Amino acid sequence: MSPRKIIIDTDPGQDDAVAILLALGSPEELDLLGITCVAGNVPLERTSINARITCEAAGRSDIPVFAGRSAPLARALVTAEHVHGKTGLDGPELIPPQMPLQDQNGVDFIINTLRREAPGSVTLCPLGPLSNIADALQRAPDIAERIQEIVLMGGAYFEVGNITPAAEFNIYVDPEAADIVLKSGVKITMMPLDVTHKALATRPRIEAIRALNSRVGTFTAEMLDFFERFDVEKYGSEGGPLHDPCVIAYLIRPDLFSGRKVNVEIETKSELTLGMTVADWWGVTDRSPNAMFMGDLDADGFFALITERLARL
């Protein structure tokens, strides 16, 4: 079977970088057509640098990287340097990338790629705020029926919020964009905090990656050394959760995950619960299911997959 064509839409972020590396280490399953960057964890200028640094760390300067939206659809940008550090990739020594940023806008790349490729053959993998994806759907409504699936990291239900008491960061940054995506009619799979908080980069798991004794292994371990400190302090957990790699791992090993097809809607009006992911987990409304909402994963299998694929780079 030919590899699945994907576009990664991202705001790197240490966990975004691990997701990119996981995709690059899995060419038999995934054909990465390009990376589009969005403002989120850090501003757009920095996310587009970080995506290229990550590609170069893997020796893949051939991957085209595009800059998309520098702000949400209707709001001022909220960033997360308090989690990811000033650069977004704090931890390892960061060498300025030599590979160029593509001239084409990232939103245009998404639209043009979906129109060029066979209908139903391209999966979108948003790892940050959904600004680029929603912008593309608004500007080119015809692409919705051409998308194979959107597999995204975002939202929360039982785990509630990580940026406000009610909202997960990616959805909170651009709730209007999330609302557009979830109402698009496209097949959607969500990796909310409910599942990503089970993907903990514990010390033994980080050391297994470091023990690869490769450029990528060291780069990843040093990122995770920095990244884990915030969540360990905040939650008292054994390690920081690797949110974004869940998206890529699902495409490679869907058997690692389980969830429910439910209705998911986004709060866009309330000051108190702005960006809340309202997931009808118990089916108490008559609203039609519109997303596969993941709730559990095999964490040992997840980290074994990441370590094995990083070893290939």
Image (tube, rainbow, N blue to C red):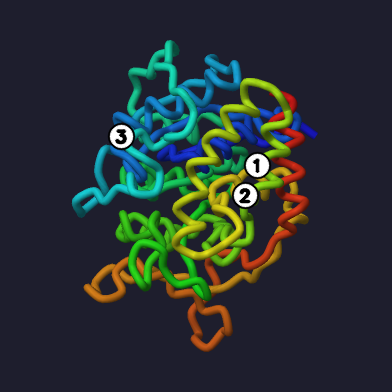
Measured Cα–Cα span from mark 2 to mark 3? 26 Å
Work out whether mark 3 precedes mark 1 in sequence or the reverse, and give the earlier one. Answer: 3
Q: Quadrant of residue 11?
A: top left
Quadrant containing the N terminus in the rendered view: top right
Relative image position of residue 60 (x, y in whole percent):
58, 18
Q: Residue at x 75, y 48 (%)?
A: 253
Say which residue appears at 55% left-offset and 64% top-offset. 291
Local crowd at mark 2 within 10 Å, few (<14), some, or many (≥20)?
A: many
Say whether residue 8 is left or right of residue 199: left
Q: Earlier in the sequence, mark 2 or mark 3?
A: 3
Residue 279 placement, left or right of 218:
left
Residue that carries the numbered disc 1 in the rendered image: 206
Specify the label residue 44 is tagged with.
Answer: 3
Count of picture labels: 3
- Residue carrying label 2: 201
**How far from the left and from the top, in percent, is residue 127?**
48, 46
The secondary structure type at the circle numbered 1 is helix
CB of mark 1 within 8 Å of CB of mark 2? yes
Asked whether disc 3 touches disc 1, contact meaning CB atoms under 8 Å apart, the reply is: no
Name the quadrant containing residue 96.
top left
Q: Are marks 2 and 3 in contact (CB under 8 Å)?
A: no
* Furthest-right residue in this view: 1
